[in-house]
Image (cartoon, helix red, strand yellow):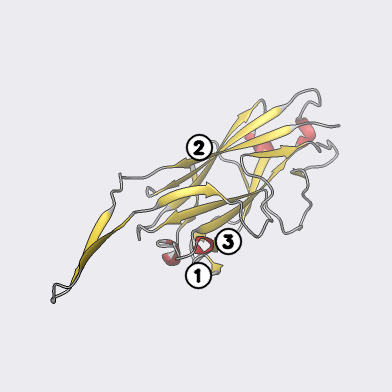
Amino acid sequence: MKKIFLITTLLLTVTAASFVGQSSFAETRTVIAAGSFDVSNIFMMEFYTGEPSKYLYTTQVSFTNMDPTKTWVQADNRSQGDGNNDIGLLCKSNLGETWYLKIQGSPGGFFLEQVKYGFWRPWNMRYGQSSNGALIEGWQPLPTSPARIFTAGANDLNNMGAETWQQGTLCGFSFAINPSQLDANNNYACQIQFTMTLSA
């Protein structure tokens, strides 16, 4: 049995307010020099495509290996315990405020109970260590409405380092499908939406 199944991941950035750049001024008493610089607020999410390259996909995750004798099947080029993830999301913020990551699925022609996602402790790129945020870890059913799965920890509130590779909190996701009730003659698609927000 061979079937093509695509999961389209949708990237949404949701903010609670419009952020405007702030300015700070530095002056000298000798009036030799005076200057200013702008510091922009950053609150964004993007697909991770850097190193390490253990994140195999970005906007589409393909399943062409639907074996009806198996309870759960992982995406193409994956095997249990291989150390890879299907996608990586890099969440960046310098606002100093608690932010939340939410997930939601919209199925096409099947029930969401047939899809689950795997999520484990994120990696804080700025500090080079695991995030100290709160999360729902492991394999979980895909929710039909936005469900909070991660709350930024103290080190994630400002995760922007000086270098590009030191920026953000990296969240890795894997997906699995139960093929037992799928029709071999159909193609299926599921849209997965991630939301980064300041609203719990």
Residue type at mark 2 is Ser
- Please rate how many residues cluster around mark 3, counting C-alpha atoms within 10 Å: few if below 14, some from 14 to 19, many from 20: some
Residue 6 circle label: none
Residue type at mark 1 is Tyr
Q: Is residue 177 left or right of residue 169?
A: right
Question: Who's the residue at 54% across and 69% down the image?
Answer: 128
Q: Which one is closest to the eye, mark 3 or mark 2?
A: 3
Q: Secondary structure at mark 1?
A: loop
CA distance for labels 1 and 2: 32 Å
CA distance for labels 3 and 1: 14 Å
Q: Position of residue 49 (x, y in %)?
A: 61, 51
Q: For residue 107, what is the image quadrant?
A: top right
Q: Is residue 36 left or right of residue 200?
A: left
The reply to whether callout 3 and callout 1 are in contact (CB within 8 Å) is no
Q: Which one is closest to the eye, mark 3 or mark 1?
A: 1
Q: Secondary structure at mark 3?
A: loop
Q: Which residue, as the protein is rendered here, is positioned at the far front? A: 32
- Please rate how many residues cluster around mark 1, counting C-alpha atoms within 10 Å: few if below 14, some from 14 to 19, many from 20: some
Q: Is residue 24 left or right of residue 46?
A: left
Identify the residue under disc 3.
121
Q: Which one is closest to the eye, mark 1 or mark 2?
A: 1
Residue type at mark 3 is Arg
Q: For residue 35, what is the image quadrant?
A: bottom left
Q: Position of residue 185 (x, y in %)?
A: 80, 23
Identify the residue under disc 1.
127
Which comes sooner in the sequence, label 3 or label 1?
Answer: 3
Residue 145 circle label: 2
